[in-house]
Amino acid sequence: MAGAKADKYRLTLEYDGGGYRGWQTQENARSVQGTLLRAAAELFGSEVDIQGAGRTDAGVHALGQVAHLAVKRSLPPPRIKEGLNDLLPATINILKVERVPPDWHARHDAVGRIYIYIFSRVRNAFGKRYAWWVKEGLNAAAMRDACRLFTGFHDFASFADRRLERHVSTKVRIAAADIEERGELIIFRVAGSHFLWKMVRRLAGVLAEVGRGNLTGEGVAELLVTRSELPARLTAPPAGLFLAQVLYPGEAAMPLVLPPPLMFAAADGRQVTGRRQDA
């Protein structure tokens, strides 16, 4: 929509990434962005532009992805939310629509991103799509100690896929990393300004190896100072990964809310069953 005066809206959405080849529009592949573009073009009856705060890979989910929608025709935010949800498949849900200034950008204006990775201690047919069952058993305390080594400013070259990021700096500042247990679930939560391609899944895979007892904290620390192919070999499956929240100036991290399909394993009563439905 270059050169055209456009109204702009901030969309907050959740999606089940299991049936998509990732967020980004791809030729001859079903994507979240492409599905949103088609629904918005139908709703507005004109050209639209949608850009996300970050790209999620095939099979990766989102609890709080953010995108901006630029259109030539104005509609009230509640009408946009209702209209898009009527046109979208059940696997994509618009949680909130807000009007933003014309120069606001979902990716460029973001100051932080929070991901969660969910491990399960139990096998369950309904949770397989959203958690990684590690049948050997996991030591959550050891994982917690190891994941805190990730905080701060480090070179995560060992955790990056250099095929697509050859010219990108592998130095990343991690604001927080922790492990939380909820019933039979172990949840790895990590916050940073940005993340490298496959980085979070490789962090999770390394933590799983720590939890199995096959890797020590000292071994994890070594991966942050010496380049190694070990994290690539340990890359965790995409099903357990969620983009939980995108942060903008003045915003704070929200309490962790698990997707309803994982209620079966959150047996300690802290699972929140409601979803955000702001207009």
Image (cartoon, helix red, strand yellow):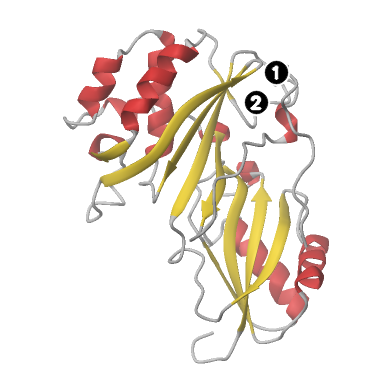
Residue 228: x, y in percent? Answer: 21, 29
Residue at left offset 47%, top offset 49%: 113
Residue 226: x, y in percent? Answer: 16, 30
* As drawn, 176 above or below 195: above
- 103 horizontally vs 7: left or right: left
* As drawn, 29 above or below 39: above
Residue 124 has which mark?
1
For this orientation, the residue located farthest to the left is 226
Residue 60 has which mark?
none
Q: Do callouts 2 and 1 mark residues in contact (Cβ within 8 Å)?
A: yes
Residue 206 appearing in the image: no
* As drawn, 137 above or below 199: above
For this orientation, the residue located farthest to the front is 250
* As drawn, 27 above or below 150: below
Quarter of the image for residue 266 reads top right
Residue at left offset 78%, top offset 63%: 279
Please identify the quadrant where the N terminus is shown: bottom right
Residue 220: x, y in percent? Answer: 28, 22
Quarter of the image for residue 173 reads top left
Crowding near the residue tagged with mark 1, few <14, some 14–19, many ≥20 C-alpha atoms within 10 Å: some
Q: Secondary structure at mark 1?
A: loop
Which sits in the foreground, 153 or 79? Answer: 153
Residue at left offset 56%, top offset 48%: 245
Q: What amino acid is labelled 2 in the image? A: Lys
**Residue designated by label 2:** 128
Residue 136 appearing in the image: yes
Residue 121: x, y in percent? Answer: 59, 13
